[in-house]
Image (cartoon, grey):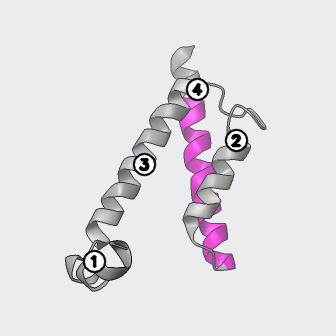
């Protein structure tokens, strides 16, 4: 039974993420805002579609890793050097 719960929770997270990303694209918002709203709504504290807190924690950690990876890819040392005076005040 535990595998079916995990599978149901994973599918709910993926479907909600895909639907929210598409909706945000259509509205013109950045998808990260939609992902945060979807996480709050389907999480254990609101609608309760995903009840396993450990699974939510693991999904959140993966999301943070992907966000940091994306920031690292777009990071520019040249731009950081230009903003040096504003950063070091």
Spot occupied by residue 33 in the image (x, y as percentages of width and height): 62, 62
Mark with earlier residue (4, 3):
4
Give the secondary structure at mark 2. Answer: helix
Camera-side mark, 1 or 3 = 1
Q: Residues within 10 Å of mark 4 (few under 14, many from 20)?
A: few
Give the secondary structure at mark 4. Answer: helix
Spot occupied by residue 30 in the image (x, y as percentages of width and height): 57, 71
Q: Which residues are magenta?
A: 7-27
Classify residue 34 by image quadrant.
bottom right
Q: Which mark is residue 80?
A: 1
Camera-side mark, 2 or 1 = 1
Q: CA gap, disc 4 to disc 3?
A: 16 Å
Q: CA gap, disc 2 to disc 1?
A: 38 Å
Left or right of 63, for residue 28: right
Mark with earlier residue (1, 3):
3
Instruction: Name the residue carrying label 3.
Output: 64
Q: CA gap, disc 4 to disc 1?
A: 38 Å
Q: Which residue is depicted at the point 66% across and 26% down? A: 51
Mark with earlier residue (2, 4):
2
Left or right of 42, for residue 32: left
Q: CA gap, disc 2 to disc 4?
A: 12 Å
- Mark 1–mark 3 CB contact (< 8 Å): no
Instruction: Name the residue carrying label 4.
Output: 53
Residue extending furthest toward the bottom? 82
Instruction: Name the residue carrying label 2.
Output: 42
Secondary structure, magenta segment, majority class = helix
Spot occupied by residue 62 in the image (x, y as percentages of width and height): 40, 43
Camera-side mark, 4 or 1 = 1
Camera-side mark, 2 or 3 = 3
């Amino acid at each position: 039974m535990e595998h079916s719960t995990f599978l149901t929770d994973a599918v709910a997270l993926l479907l909600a993420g895909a639907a929210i990303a598409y909706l945000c694209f259509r509205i013109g918002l950045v998808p990260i805002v939609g992902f945060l709203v979807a996480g709050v709504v389907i999480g254990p504290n609101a609608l309760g579609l995903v009840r396993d807190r450990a699974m939510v924690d693991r999904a959140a950690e993966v999301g943070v890793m992907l966000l940091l990876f994306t920031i690292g890819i777009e990071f520019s040392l040249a731009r950081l050097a230009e903003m040096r005076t504003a950063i070091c005040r």
